[in-house]
Amino acid sequence: MNTNPCLNNFEPLLEPREAAKLLNVHHVTLLRLVRAGTFPAVRVGKLWRFRATDLNAWVTSQMASQNRRSK
């Protein structure tokens, strides 16, 4: 049993290709959004990584934004 509370809340990070596959976009497109500052990502050394919960939150916010614009 793990008693470290930090490890209980740890979410594995996704590589750009994995995150892009979940979003059904090309990984280069995803990295362009990250570099533009419009998509949440974590930089680990020279590599970009993604949390699945951040992907879901971003998609949800984009949908809400589009719903507000269409009204």
Image (cartoon, rainbow, N blue to C red):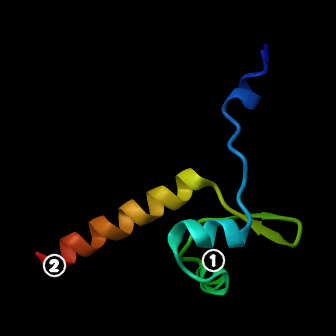
Residue drawn at x 21%, y 70% as measured from the top left:
67
Contact between marks 1 and 2 (CB within 8 A): the answer is no
Q: Percent position (x, y) of residue 24? A: 52, 75
Q: Percent position (x, y) of residue 45? A: 89, 66
Say if 33 sits above or below 12 in the image.
Answer: below
Residue drawn at x 63%, y 66% as measured from the top left:
19
Residue drawn at x 83%, y 70% as measured from the top left:
47
User: Residue 18 sits in which quadrant?
Assistant: bottom right
User: Nearest the camera: 59 or 46?
Assistant: 59
Q: What is the count of numbered marks?
A: 2
Q: Amino acid at mark 2?
A: Ser
In the picture of the structure, the residue carrying the numbered disc 2 is 70
Say if 47 sits above or below 7 in the image.
Answer: below
Residue drawn at x 56%, y 72% as measured from the top left:
39
User: Residue 21 sits in which quadrant?
Assistant: bottom right
In-image side of 37 versus 46 (left or right): left
Q: Amino acid at mark 1?
A: Val
- Calculate the distance from the C-alpha at mark 1 to the C-alpha at mark 2: 26 Å
Name, please, the residue furthest toward the left. Answer: 71
Q: Percent position (x, y) of residue 40? A: 59, 66
Q: Quadrant of the C terminus?
A: bottom left
Q: Sequence-wise, which precedes: disc 1 or disc 2?
A: 1
Q: Quadrant of the N terminus?
A: top right
In the picture of the structure, the residue carrying the numbered disc 1 is 34
Say if 14 sits above or below 33 in the image.
Answer: above
